[in-house]
Every structure is written in C-alpha cells, then in structure tokens.
Image (cartoon, rainbow, N blue to C red):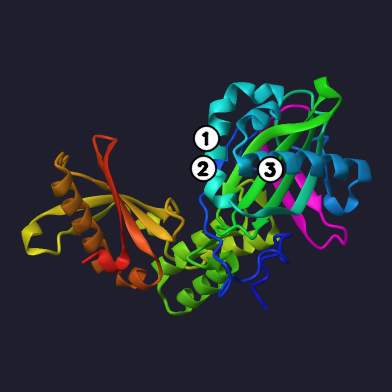
C-alpha cells in the first residue's frame, strides 16, 4: 500500500518503477489568476463542485474546452491557443506562448486523461478578492482547498490531467473561465505543466524514500526528498489537501531545515583551492533538466573566464558534498549558480559522479 497521498489522483499516481519515466519540466503562467498559498481568509459567497457532481452540460462543455486547449498545446498550434484566451489575459499572450512551447517535449506522443475537475462559482463576489474554495468529495471523506488571489467575480474551473503514453508523462492543469461576452464559453485563464516523475520515480516513491531517509537520520536528503515528492504529486501549488498537510508535517518534524543553516561557508577541497572559501546562500530542488537535481546559489568571486568559472563552480559543489556526502546517492546531480553583486554570472549542472 502506498503512502496515503490522498490527492484525488490515486488511480493515476501509482509508482512508476519499471514503467515509462514521468520526466517533464514545469512551466507555469499565472495569468488572470495569480495563485499561491494564502493565510486564513474571510468567508466568501463562493462554492466548489467536484466532478462527481457536475451537471452533464457542464461536464461536456469543460471537457470540450479542456481537450481543445490541451490539443493546441501538444500540437503547438498557437493560433488556436491564442483564440482560446479569456479577454482579460489576451495581453499575457507572450507568457502563455512560452509556457506552451516549454510543454512540447513533456506532452509529445501522449493523450490527455483528465483525472480531476473542480467547478468554482464566484459569481457573488462584489470585487476581486483573495478567495478559497473548499471542495469536498462525494462521501465527504476528503476536502481539497483551492486558493486563488485577486479573483474577479465569475465562474471558473480547474482541470488536472496526465498525458498517458507520453515519454515524459507530464501533468497539465488548466484554469478556465466562463466568458460572459461569448455566451459563457469556457476559455483559458491559466496554464501549468510539471513533471509527474523524476529519474523514473513518482511523488509517492519520493515520499516513501523521504521517510526511509528520515529513519536513517539523513536529514538533508530527507528534506529535499519531501520537497521532490510535493513537487511531483500535483502540477500546481494552490491546491492542498489533508494528505499534503500530512507530508508538510512530516517534513517539519525532521528537526532540520537546510535553509536554517544558510548562509553556509565552505572551503575548497582541491590543492589549488587551498585558502579559498565561498558562501552558499540558497539550496533548493531544481528540475530544469527533468532530473532530481539540487541547486546551489553561491557568492562568486566574479570570474569572467568560462574555464575558471567552471572550475570555481565545481569546487563549490565538491566542497558542499564533502559536508553532505549522503546527497550523492539520493539525487542525480547539482547545479551551481554563481552570483556577484546580486547578478547571476555563471551556471553549470554536473551529475554526482562527475563531481570530485
């Protein structure tokens, strides 16, 4: 039995060991609706309907809109995609197009399977508000919370799907809005894409792995494995559930939050680096290459020669792994991002086996 991720996606989020890899890159466009975690909000006249209670007319209209938009993204049909935008986000077309272009390798050769849908009624709002929708399933066993910022009055929907058969097996989420100027037709307000798995493992696997690492007192590896699990379980950050809250609690109970150790000063490990040191100011998960990498942001000496900058970055990574050697066996590689006077000057990714 897998950990009770309880994300409303259990049938789609099973372990991918031995199956095709769910490797993808998340690109998100926060368009009409800027989503994020919110503090407690006042009660509002809004409500949420889960897909089991959709009226047939709503279900058919949402699926038609969702499938059309998903097909446009997968086929890179930008004319059709642009025509699907809500009027309020037409000015964001460049951002939307960028998201769609980044999604191409993620969705290639796959077919969308919509796993979850939520109909969000905010027609009684008097003005744009930070809004929470509490979406309870048919048997009242799980309540999902959708938090949206500066939401105008209207009818909205959230659709979440997987691209089955795609080599990278990505996840796709759409925020749709009913266009009152087009007879209530559903149009695109937000587009989100994220990996469903990294290095052949899905979010449930990483959740399990985090627990195993916690039991071994490998706190840093456990912390970032929890981060990886959270990243993979859903393609958006504004949807939460009691089960994701459970993951967060488990992570907080590790007793070690790497960010509390920062800034971290490390010394060079090679003879050529004797007497040198660097300050690491941030460490975080980085899925740029569709792998489970960690990223280090460090204060650089300002080298401009690429060869010298690469050597410096490699020394930083090597020194970091000397302090936390257990990370080598639990993550694919490291990114090193050099910064000087607040500006990024160099970046490189190396697999763990290529870091001395």
Query: Which portion, as a residue range, is magenta?
Result: 133-153
Q: Is residue 114 above or below residue 207?
A: above
Residue that mark 1 sits on: 98
Disc nearer the start of the sequence (1/3): 3
Q: Distance from label 2 to label 1 (Cα)?
A: 6 Å
User: Is 182 inside the magenta-drawn segment?
Assistant: no
Q: Are marks 2 and 1 in contact (CB under 8 Å)?
A: yes
Q: Is residue 95 above or below residue 339?
A: above
Q: Are marks 3 and 2 in contact (CB under 8 Å)?
A: no
Quarter residue 164 falls in: bottom right
Query: Is residue 36 found left or right of 225 in the rendered image?
Result: right
Residue that mark 3 sits on: 71
**Where is residue 309 drawn, in percent x and y?**
18, 47
Query: Is residue 91 found left or right of 348 in the rendered image?
Result: right
Q: Secondary structure at mark 1?
A: helix
Q: Give the number of callouts.
A: 3
Residue that mark 2 sits on: 102
Q: Distance from label 3 to label 2 (Cα)?
A: 15 Å
* Residue at image coords 73%, 66%: 11
Q: Secondary structure at mark 2?
A: helix
* Residue at image coords 86%, 45%: 59
């Amino acid at each position: 039995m897998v950990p009770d991720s309880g994300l409303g996606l259990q049938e789609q989020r099973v372990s991918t060991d031995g199956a095709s890899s769910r490797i993808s890159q998340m690109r998100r466009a926060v368009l009409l609706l800027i989503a994020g975690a919110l503090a407690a909000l006042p009660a509002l006249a809004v409500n949420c309907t889960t897909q089991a209670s959709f009226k047939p007319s709503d279900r058919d209209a949402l699926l038609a809109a969702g499938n059309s938009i998903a097909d446009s993204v997968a086929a890179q049909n930008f004319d059709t995609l642009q025509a699907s935008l809500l009027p309020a986000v037409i000015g964001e077309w460049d951002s939307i197009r960028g998201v769609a272009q980044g999604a191409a390798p993620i969705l290639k050769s796959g077919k969308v399977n919509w796993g979850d849908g939520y109909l969000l009624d905010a027609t009684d709002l008097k003005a744009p508000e930070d809004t929470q929708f509490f979406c309870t399933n048919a048997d009242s066993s799980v309540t999902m919370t959708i938090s949206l910022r500066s939401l105008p009055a209207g009818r909205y929907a959230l659709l979440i799907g997987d691209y089955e058969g795609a080599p990278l097996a990505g996840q796709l989420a759409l925020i749709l809005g009913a266009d009152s100027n087009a007879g209530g037709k559903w149009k695109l307000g937000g587009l989100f894409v994220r990996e469903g798995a990294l290095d052949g493992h899905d979010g449930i696997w990483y959740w399990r792995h985090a627990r195993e690492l916690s039991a071994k007192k490998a706190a840093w590896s456990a912390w970032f494995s929890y981060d990886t699990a959270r990243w993979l379980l859903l393609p958006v950050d504004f949807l939460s559930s009691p089960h994701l809250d459970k993951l967060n609690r488990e992570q907080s109970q590790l007793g070690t939050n790497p960010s509390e150790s920062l800034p971290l000063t490390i010394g060079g490990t090679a003879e050529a680096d004797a007497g040198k040191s660097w300050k690491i100011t941030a460490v975080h998960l980085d899925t740029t290459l569709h792998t489970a990498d960690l990223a280090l942001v460090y204060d650089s000496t300002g080298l401009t020669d690429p060869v010298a900058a690469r050597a410096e970055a490699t020394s930083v990574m090597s020194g970091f792994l000397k302090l936390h050697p257990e990370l080598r066996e639990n993550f694919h590689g490291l990114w090193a991002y050099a910064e000087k006077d607040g500006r990024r000057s160099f970046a490189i990714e190396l697999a763990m086996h290529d870091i001395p």
